[in-house]
Image (spheres, helix red, strand yellow):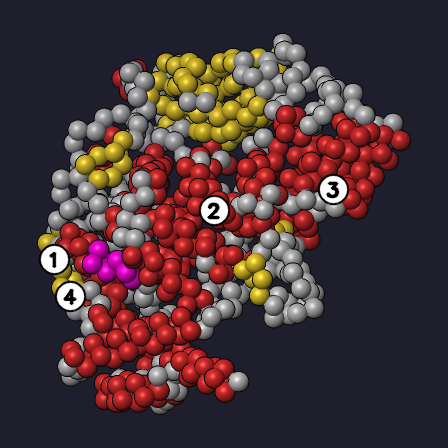
Amino acid sequence: MPVLFLLLLSFLQGLAADTSGYQKLVQPYVAKHCSTCHNAKAKVAGLDLDRTADSITADQDVWEKVARKIKTGEMPPKGLPVPPSADSAAVTAWIDKEFARYDKARGQHDPGRVTARRLNRVEYNNTIRDLTGLDLHPADAFPVDDSGYGFDNIGDVLSLSPALMEKYMTAAERVARASIAIPRTFRETSDRYRSDRVKQVGPPGSIDVSHNFPIEGDYTIRIAIAGKRIEEADGLFVSALVDGREMQRFDGVNPPNKPRMRDLTIRPPAGTHRIRVQFTNADGRPVSEDKGVLIEYLDIRGPKNPGAFAPPPSHKLILVCGEWPGKYSDACLRQIVETFARRAFRRPVTTAEVDTLFGYVTKAKADGEPPERALRLAMQAVLVSPHFLFRVERDAKPTDTKAVHRINEFELASRLSYFLWSSMPDEELYNLAAKGRLRRNLEPQVRRMVADRKFAAFTENFVGQWLGLRNLDEAKPAKEKFPQFDNELREAMKMETQLFFENVVREDRSLAEFLDANYTFLNERLAKHYGIAGVSGPEFRKVTLTTSQRGGLVTMASVLTVSSYPNRTSPVIRGKYLLENFLNSPPPAPPPNVPSLEESAGGMKGTLRQQLEKHRTNAICASCHTRMDPLGFGLENYDAVGTWRETDDGFPIDASGTMPGGRAFQGPGELKSLLKNSQSDFAQCMAEKMMIYALGRGLEKQDRTFVRQVVSRVAADNYRFMRLVMEIVNSAPFQLRRGEAGGTS
C-alpha cells in the first residue's frame, strides 16, 4: 500500500505545472519586457499578463500567442529594447515544454459536445440528391443559412423558424412527387427565364439555366435578344447549347423593324438539363467582351409529341421491391418504407418508427389511393422528421452528464460524410458501420471518399468559406476601371482555385504548396488576364509557371479580388486576410468611432502606401496597422481584379514590406517565400479552421491540446494534406463526445 501511495503521489506531482520554471524564467521576462503594456491598467490589445497565475495552461490561447509573437520577433514592439535572444529562446522553450507536459499528462481530455445540427442548404440539397438519385435542389428556395466561426454548418446558429418549417413541408411534397412517379399525361406548359432573375455565370450577355423536362418530348426554346441592334459588321452569332453540346447556331444580325427572336426545337430525355445561350464569333468561340447586347429571356414550351412515360432513376433507389406501377404486397411496401427511412435517418430504424410511417401507407390505401401515392405520404413524413432534418447523436449514459464516450459507428459515418461530402453516408460506409468495422477501416475509407467526385463539395464549401470565394459571386469591380472583368472571368478565377486545391489534395502534396507553387491551372481567358502566353481554348489545364508573379493561393485573382474594394486595392484588407487565413494571427476588431481612410481627402496625393501612412501615425490605429498594412503592400503589384501592374495612377509601386516580427521582403515573390517559411503557423491555421468545419462548432479551451497534437503529427509527415485530414478524423473531438442531461444532443 505505501508503495502504491508513493507511485500515485509521484504521478500526481508529474501532472503539476512546473511552477519553478514559470517563476525563474517567465515571470521575470514578462515583468521586464511585457508588463509595461500588458498590465491590469494599460491592457493593450485587451491583454493583462500580470493576472496570469503560475500555470499557463489556464490561458492556453493567450500563451500560445505570446510564444508565437516572441518567436517571430513581433514582440516587444519596434522601438522598445530587444530582449537577449537566449532569454527569449528559454522562455518559449519552457512554454512549449509546459504545453507538451500538459497534453501528455492530462490523459482523457474533454472532447467537447456537438449539439444536434440541422442540415444547411447545401447539405439538404446533396442529401436529397443521394437519397433519391435526383438533383432537384429544393433547398435553393430556403432562407440563407446563418454563419458562425466563418462557416454555415455550425450547429448553434442553424435555427429552425416556422417559415423554414413550411419550406421543408413544401419541399418534402415536391421531392416525393418527383421521386415516386405515377403514369400520367402531360399538358403543354411554358416556363420563362429572365436574365435579370437568374445567376449570371457565362460570357457577357449570355444566359445559363437548368430546366427540368418532365418527360421526353419536343420542346421549343424561344430566345429573346435585347440591347443594341446587331449588324452584319459585328460578326456576332447566337449559339444554343444543351448540356454543353451546341444544338444550333443562329446568325445574330437584327435588321430594323424585325423581331429579335430565335426559335429551336429539341427533344431531350426526361430529367434536368442545362441550357446555355451565348454570343459567339463565326468560329463558334464565345465572345468575351460586352458588345452591348444580351439574351433577355428564354421561353421553354412543351412537351409536344411526348414519348412513353418512363419511371425516373429514383425508383431504383426507393422502390426496392415489387413491380411498378401498382404491384406491391404489404410486406414489400413496408420494406420500401423501412429502407427509405433507414437511409434518410442515417441509422437503423426501430419497429415503432416503421409502424408509424407504414400507418400512412395503410390509411391511404384504405382511402382508395394507389400504392405509389400512399408511399409518397410516408416519404413526406420521413423528410419532415427531425431525424432527417437534424444530425442527432445520442449519449451512451443519459444519467451521467459528464460521461465521455465514443460516438457509435453510424454517427461516425455521418460525421465523415458530412465533413468530406456535405451529404449522407453511402451504402459502403453504412454497411461497414452496421458490421462495426468502420473504425478499423478509417484511412482507406477517407482516401476513397477524397477520391470520389462528391469530394468537390468539400472544395466548394470549406475552401469557398475559408478563402471567402463565395464573395466572388457578389464581387462587382467598377466597370469603368476594370472593363475586362465579367462573369466568364469570374468563373475562371474560381475554377483555378478549386482545381489547384483539388490537385494538392488528390496528389497528397504538402500544405506549403498552398503558399507557393510553380504551377497553376489556367484556360485561355485567365491566362490572358495574367499575361501568360501559350494557353488557348476554354479548357483548363495544368501550367508550369516561370516567374514568381503567380503561384500559390495568395497571388490568384480570386483571392486578390475578394480582398479588394470595387474601385481599388486595399493593403489593409489584404494584410488582414493574410493574418487571418494564412498566419493564424487575426488582428482584433478596430476600435469604435475610428474613421476609415478618406480616399478623396483634400491634398491627398501619391500612392495608396503614402495615403495609408495616416493609419500608422494614429496611435490608436498603429498597433494593428503596422502588422496588416506592410503585408498588404507586398501584393500591391496586383490591381483590384488581380492583374499585374508596375504603377498605380502613374506612381511606381513599392511592393516592399515586412512580416510580423520585422522580416523584410521585396515584392510578392519574397513575401511568398517568407509565408512558406511560416508553414507551421499556416498548418495550425488550417487545422483550426478544418476542425471547426468538421465538428460544426467553435473551438473551446480544451481543444487547444487536440489542435497542437494534430499540427505536431502533420509536421512530422512533411505537412501532407491527407495527414491533416486523418489526424482530424482520428482526433478525440471527432471520435468522442461528452454527455449531457437528457441523453440526446
> Is most of the magenta stretch helix, strand or loop?
helix
* Amino acid on which disc 2 is placed: Leu
**Disc 4 and disc 2 in contact, CB within 8 angstroms:** no
Callout 1: 10 Å neighbours few (<14), some, many (20+)? some
**Disc 3 and disc 1 in contact, CB within 8 angstroms:** no
Measured in 3D between alpha carbons, the distance from the residue under mark 1 to the one under mark 4, in whole angstroms, is 11 Å
Residue nearest the viewer, comparing 127 with 146: 127
Measured in 3D between alpha carbons, the distance from the residue under mark 2 to the one under mark 3, in whole angstroms, is 33 Å
Between tags 3 and 1, which lies in front?
3
On the image, the x and y values in percent for residue 701 come to 45, 71
Among the 4 quarters of the image, the one containing residue 369: top right
**Is residue 55 rendered to the left or right of residue 145?**
left
- Counting residues from the start of the chain, the first of labels 2 and 1 encountered is 2
Q: From what the image shows, is residue 367 above or below residue 52?
A: above
The secondary element bearing badge 1 is classed as strand
The secondary element bearing badge 3 is classed as helix
Measured in 3D between alpha carbons, the distance from the residue under mark 3 to the one under mark 4, in whole angstroms, is 62 Å
- Counting residues from the start of the chain, the first of labels 4 and 2 encountered is 2
**Disc 2 and disc 1 in contact, CB within 8 angstroms:** no
The residue pinned by badge 4 equals: 663
The residue pinned by badge 1 equals: 666
The residue pinned by badge 3 equals: 381
Residue 521 visible, this angle: yes
- Counting residues from the start of the chain, the first of labels 2 and 3 encountered is 3
Q: From what the image shows, is residue 685 above or below residue 126?
A: below
Among the 4 quarters of the image, the one containing residue 498: top left
Between tags 2 and 1, which lies in front?
2
Residue at position x 15%, y 46% in the image: 548
Measured in 3D between alpha carbons, the distance from the residue under mark 4 to the one under mark 2, in whole angstroms, is 42 Å
The secondary element bearing badge 4 is classed as loop
* Amino acid on which disc 4 is placed: Arg
* Amino acid on which disc 1 is placed: Gln
